[in-house]
Amino acid sequence: MQKWEYLFVGCEGGRPRWVNGSELAGWKSNELFAWANQRGEEGWELVSDSAEIPHLAYQLVFKRPKS
């Protein structure tokens, strides 16, 4: 049976800020498109998003096969 691992990413102001509850160091300098593309290179696939548009806060969920 296939097993999965997940990344829960909290974004603020169009930038990834938290990953699985831990704040990213230097998060204000991370561009979302570059950060997400890097996760893709690591085998992560975006599977869900949700947004609070007035606050520009949203959550992304990535998954990849567990090795």
Image (cartoon, rainbow, N blue to C red):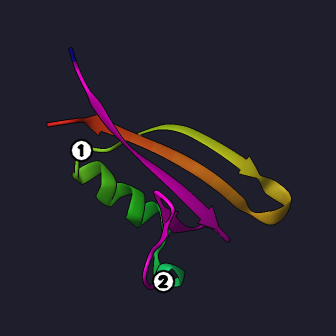
**Dividing the image into 4 quarters, which one contains the C terminus?**
top left
Q: Quadrant of residue 44?
A: top left
Which region shows up in magenta? Answer: 2-26
Disc ID at residue 65: none
- SS at circle 2: helix
Q: Label 1 to label 2, Cα distance in Å?
A: 23 Å
Q: Residue at x 42, y 43 (%)?
A: 62
Residue located beneath label 1 in the image: 43
| Front in this rendered view, residue 61 or 41 | 61
Query: Does the CB distance between marks 1 and 2 fall below 8 Å?
Result: no
- Kindly identify which numbered label has been placed on residue 29: 2
- Place of residue 23 in the rendered image (x, y in percent of width and height, measured from the top left): 50, 73
Location of the N terminus (image quadrant): top left
Q: Earlier in the sequence, mark 1 or mark 2?
A: 2
The kind of residue tagged 1 is Gly
Name which residue type carries label 2: Ser
Residue located 22% across and 52% down the image: 42
In the image, residue 44 lies in the stretch drawn in magenta: no
Q: Residue 38, position in %: x, y?
A: 30, 60
Position of 45 relative to 27 (above/below): above
Left or right: 8 as drawn, with respect to 43: right
Q: Residue at x 49, y 79 (%)?
A: 27
Classify 31 as above or below 11: below
Image label count = 2
Secondary structure beneath dot 1 equals: loop
For this orientation, the residue located farthest to the left is 67
Q: Residue at x 67, y 43 (%)?
A: 50
Return the x and y of residue 9 as percentages of the image width and height: 51, 56
Q: Is residue 2 left or right of residue 35?
A: left
Residue occupying the far right of the picture = 54
